[in-house]
Image (spheres, coloured by chain):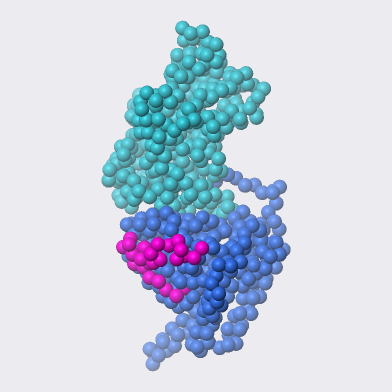
Chain colours: A blue, B cyan
Amino acid sequence: MASSETQAREGAEQSTRYLDAYSRMLLIRAFETAIHRLFLRGEVHGTTHLYAGQEASAVGVCMALEPDDYVAGTYRGHGHALAKGTTPEALAAEMLGRASGVCGGRAGSMNVIDLEHGLVGCFGIVGGSIGAALGAALSAKRQGRVAVAFFGDGATNQGYFHECLNMAAVQALPAVFVCENNLYGEFTPMAAVTAGGDIPGRARAFGMPSVSVDGNDVWAVEAAAREAVERARSGGGPTLIETRTYRHYGHSKSDPGAYRTPGELESWLERDPLRLTRERLLGEGVGEEQLAGLESAVEQQMAAAVEAALAAPYPDPGVEHASEFR
Amino acid sequence: MAELEFRVAIRDALAEELERDPTVVFFGEDIAAAGGVFKATPDLYERFGPERVFDTPISELALAGAAFGAAVTGLRPVFEVMFGDFMGLAMDSLVNQAAKFWYISNEQGSVPLVVRSAVGGGGRFGAIHSQIHGTWFQGVPGLKIVCPSTPAEAKGLLKAAIRDDNPVIFLEHKRLYSVKGPAPQDGEVLPLGQARIARPGDDLTIVALGKNVSDALSAAEELAADGLSAEVIDLRCLRPLDIETVLESLSRTQRLLAVEEGPRTGGWATGLLGAITERGLHDLDDAWIIATAETPVPYSPTLEDAFMPDSAAIVAEVRERLGVPVG
């Protein structure tokens, strides 16, 4: 009887964890929808790279992390930051170039840093996150922590990928390399520029355990991440996880995605990670009302975050006291 | 007075800082078990162990990325890029990650890393093992660039670089490794960004960096016999660049000669003369530069010797330019 009570409690805890994950994925989607809208209104400047469609990757991986573990993200990094704990208020204000932004408006969309939440940075250079995570893993090894690099399929053709995976494997560092394969490097199909086409195979060439998972299935991503994180934390060295996923928008705000094959986007929308998560939660007995409640709470949270960001002041060049050095 | 060899000064500075601060780590190619190709880092691996001092793959970009990532998460990494010429491979992480982090993070954290390299010509290493990469990085805000001229300076400046909270590019002229000089006082840490008057004088200010400081001092000695009193300034750092010390010297001498081992175009000497002109034009009677030819560093001994600015070249240029009587 005690055991059935334990099982029931564990079941409830599991549901809560995946409800939290669903909520975090909803937040990322709402964030990107809002940023897309604000970009069209001229409130977000330069360019921006939206993460919509890939939410299960960042959220699934971060479910397996402790708050003080390290994450390095990419220029498509809004999802990485929100998954690791950056608040939507601080992130939205950063996108809008406001003084209340997580980096005071100095960084912008591509280069977010949030050390308080273990985000060592998002990197505007393809592959930059891999080098940063390699170094964070040197610290993490002493601190009992783990360092994660998110990067895309395009980054696996950079020197950073090959040099850093080799060094992390040689030194058995506590790193997890998460390749979000969204099938395109900027405007070019991955297959056209990636010899062999087998990203986990590249990691295996370094003697590194490596696995490919459905990147739109947050349960699958989390399970793979949990195994990799446990291996890293227990001294077993690095792992590569390929999450197969898809970006709903083009590469950047200048890219309408004209190179997509007919029906491609539609078929991926059928496998929208939010939809898959919602359906599974319903199937596991979570009530429609509870899900609708979460959805409306996230929408309100995001609307409030945008309102606060729009009301926040821009940094004043007249009072800004930037110092070149610490 | 106790004598110290330049390469030993480097090793001692590393050893003292590794000893003093457990967050200091040191890595690079052949620096641990082999003790460094210039024998500047022997015994550190044996003394501090593989967690603190370790050999790495020949992967300069990974080394720079590793140093950056380690520095923003609690360590104080020092890494060696064996020859400065290899710094092109490490550039992304240093320029786009390390140099910008303090500012774009809105000062959430800084990047206490040091990258040491052997630099400079005169070793018959040819075009791609002889460059001085300081000027490649001089225009990047957020970096400090240090180039010591003597063993004592090397020790005090390297200790300062390791203790500094910002990314520091540290240049060790390969013709200095075997030079011996007076040892510094125990524990001396020199300031970064502050030039040093290596020899006082009244008639001419010669500004030099690294190995050229000793060339300028020899030249000053010879010119003294001509009746010309040359002040020699050891610039020490390319960034921050200490304009004040040079301006103060010029207010007394009115003449400036900058000696650079590197091309005039885009070199630090042209930048220095620009800054001096902007702020000290009223003090200037003359200002000029001795630099290298606008070619890669040649290999053949006759060509390389002619390429490098040395004491004889400085003396000849000064005599001709200022009309100092010979002999």
Q: For this rendering, which residue is in front, A64 or A45?
A: A45
Q: For this rendering, which residue is in front, A235 or A130?
A: A130
* Residue B38 in view of the camera: yes
Does A98 appear above or below A67? above
User: Residue B21: where, in percent of width, then height?
Assistant: 40, 47
Does A23 appear above or below B149? below
The mark tally for this picture is 0
* Residue B24 in view of the camera: no
User: Residue A202: where, in percent of width, then height?
Assistant: 36, 63
Horizontal side of A248 relative to B32 (left or right) equals: right
Q: For this rendering, which residue is in front, B163 or B209?
A: B209
In which quadrant of the rendered view does residue B271 lie?
top right
Does A26 appear above or below B153? below
Does A48 appear above or below B41? below
Tell whether position B296 is magenta.
no
User: Residue A42: where, in percent of width, then height?
Assistant: 70, 61
- Residue range corresponding to the magenta coloring: A188-215
Q: For this rendering, which residue is in front, B287 or B20?
A: B287
Q: Residue at x 56, y 54 (%)?
A: B105
Spot the residue most to the bottom: A1
Tell whether position A209 is magenta.
yes
Q: Residue at x 38, y 54 (%)?
A: A163
Q: Residue at x 46, y 31 (%)?
A: B295
Q: Which quarter shows the N terminus of chain B?
A: top left
In which quadrant of the rendered view does residue A92 lie?
bottom right
User: Residue B190: where, in percent of width, then height?
Assistant: 47, 34
Q: Residue at x 58, y 67 (%)?
A: A257
